[in-house]
Amino acid sequence: MHDEQFREILRYFGRSWSGYRRVRRGVMKRLRAHMLTLECRSLTEYLQRLETETEERQRSERCMDVSISRFFRDRDLWQVLGGVVLPGLILGTEEGIRVWSAGCACGEEAYSFKIVWQTLHNRFDRLPELELWATDVNPVFLEKAQEGIYTPSSLKELPAPWRSTCFDRLPRRNRFALSASLKRDIVWKQHNLVSEAPPSAGFHLVFLRNNLLTYYEKGLQIPAFGRVVSALREGGMLVIGKKERIPPECGPLVPSATCPFAFEKPE
């Protein structure tokens, strides 16, 4: 498979070349393997199979999934969340706090949030009830997330004191197992950001980082983004990736004055 063939597959699925360009090698390798499994000798034959066989189309789309994440990715974001945003939410509400990690991949983002939330027990006598949703379209990613076992590279941005308190090292596998307490009370759900309504509503905080705004073309991106924004409560905050931009067609959001890469839904 060469780049022009890959571009044709991207167009078929409504995906963005600019989003996939740097990660295309692994994706192309998975797509080639899927084509061989189906005994397709040409791209035309492959796309015809996908058009008529729903399960194979779904398998092909899973080949397109990219899981590049790590704990505390963009550490300055997490510092502001723990130091400013979450304390403000805690002091400003008597009800529970609702958070959605949309496109959670293998769980590093959701668990990073749980670690930050846990540290706030040292600053507040009582924390509100936390309702944390973590969703992804790929069931394999969700299974890995719930297992909670990670490589050293996933932890490279994790502050050193938390590595020993939040993880147990598994020396034979050179892996780190997340503490059981941090795995509790997360709602894991398979969910397609592009085609499905949000899993719930009234979120105070939504993470939509390095997925919808990176890998999809505007024809799919804009309506899906609108649905995500609709799940935010008034005054809620949407966090996107460091290099992502919100399309001008999308939503009544204003840049956050306190949090990097974040936008607020006006009250």
Image (tube, rainbow, N blue to C red):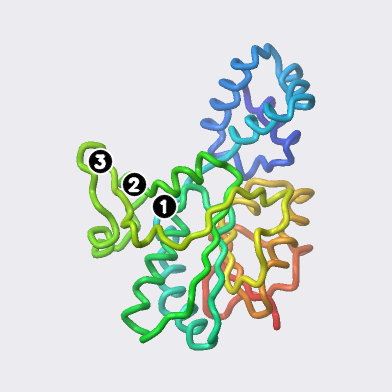
Spatial CA span between label 3 and label 1: 16 Å
Dot 1 surroundings within 10 Å: few (below 14), some, or many (20 or more)? many
Residue 125 is left or right of residue 132, and the answer is left
Asked if residue 107 is positioned above or below residue 54 in the image, the reply reads below
Quarter occupied by residue 66: top right
Q: Residue 40 at x, y = what percent?
A: 68, 14
Disc 2 target residue: 153
* Disc 1 target residue: 70
Tell me where residue 219 appears, x and y as whole percent: 79, 49
- Which image quarter holds the N terminus? top right
Q: Nearer the viewer, mark 3 or mark 1?
A: 3
Where is residue 42? Give x, y as percent.
Answer: 70, 15
Q: Which residue is mark 3?
A: 174
56 versus 102 height, above or below: above
Residues marked 2 and 1 touching at CB (< 8 Å): yes
Question: Which of disc 2 and disc 3 is earlier in sequence?
Answer: 2
